[in-house]
Image (tube, rainbow, N blue to C red):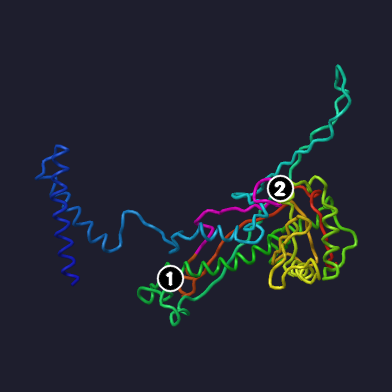
Amino acid sequence: MKAMKMIVTVLLTVLISVIGGGVVATAAGFDPAVFIPVTTGLSLLAAPMARAGILPMAVNITSIYAGEVLDQLLVRATTNNEMVAGGHMHIEPNVQKKFAIPRLRAGKMLQKRKEQPTEEDSKGDFTVDERYLEPKEFMAFTTFNPRAFERFWRPFQPTGELVFRELPAEAQNKMLGEMAKVVDFQLGGEFINGVYGEEEEKFFDGIVTRIVAEDDVVKVADPVAITESTVLAALKGTVKLIPKAMKKATVKPNMKLFMSVTDAETYDYVLTEKPYKGVDYTQMSPERFKGFKIVPLADWPENVIAAAFSTPGIDSNFWGGVDYIDDTTAIQIDKLTNAGEKYFFKMLMKADTNIVWPEDIVLYDAREV
């Protein structure tokens, strides 16, 4: 069989060289009788070299990952969490090192009319400053042996000779999909509760961490733990401190009350058990308080309520910055060692959060210090 393949290859090489060489020689003005034997000889010489693996250009392939799931994975990893997917935070992409969020505020300017105002009559000013997003680097890294799946799922069975087995593309996609779910879950929590530090699992500061650290945030005095007997008072105390400008009808739809799922359920039970104004026991109460939308989040800490203006646009008080690192370094899939059977998945990421106007945020924090 190998001899037959060799004969066919040689015959095809001679045929292509004769036809192609004749055309090229005629067009270039060369004598075909001289040109064709030369090109045919070179082709026959090159054929066994190519079959032996000697190519004009060496291609160094360090991974069998083709990049077909990169967009899907990065989008899920950076947007499929409650804060972002719910439209409660503006995400600024491609922030490699530092991104400035400019803020402009104007002072009061109205005064009595003067016929000829001068420089001394100037009243009010403009204040321009900045807040920053500085994404911190972190990664996801795990190893596994694809042969462990051979007994359970055929697509996970490596193909090829035993020594040169490769992980099929379908298996890569499935494993990356599961990896993405874990990354989604963890990032969702970090966007809310993250704390930056040198220790492990302290990647960047989340929204709650930013709010608590700001001195200009309006804070409810003497908060108590949220129970069925205190939840209405907690919501009332939070809403009463919202700045008047943020209570206008045009602003109200995006002025939200962020709570934990547990505390939101407590509020729902209180409304349900009202003897006259309560809702049907089989239905959920509207997630609203005095016209403000309540946003229950699974990762939001219990006994904490935050009132803030939030949208997915640049007018949002909550911002997040991420960096879509280059395809070749964002996700790596390869063998852990040349001599071993284990593979590794490695994904590099950057992320950070910040708030723009802390004085427009009201915080009810009854957690034990």
What's the residue at 74%, 55% (across, down)?
Answer: 256
Residue type at mark 2 is Tyr
161 is higher (above) or lower (below) than 212: below
Q: Where is residue 48 in the image (x, y as percent from the top left)?
A: 23, 61
Element under disc 2 = strand
Residue type at mark 1 is Leu
Residue 132 - label: 2
Quick one: which residue is furthest to the front in this view?
A: 276
Quadrant assignment, res 27: top left
* 54 displayed left or right of 348: left
Q: Where is residue 302 in the image (x, y as percent from the top left)?
A: 77, 68
Residue 312 sits inside the magenta stretch: yes
**Observer-nearest of 14 and 293:** 293
Q: Mark 1 points at which residue?
A: 167
What's the residue at 82%, 61% (across, down)?
Answer: 235
Quadrant assignment, res 273: bottom right
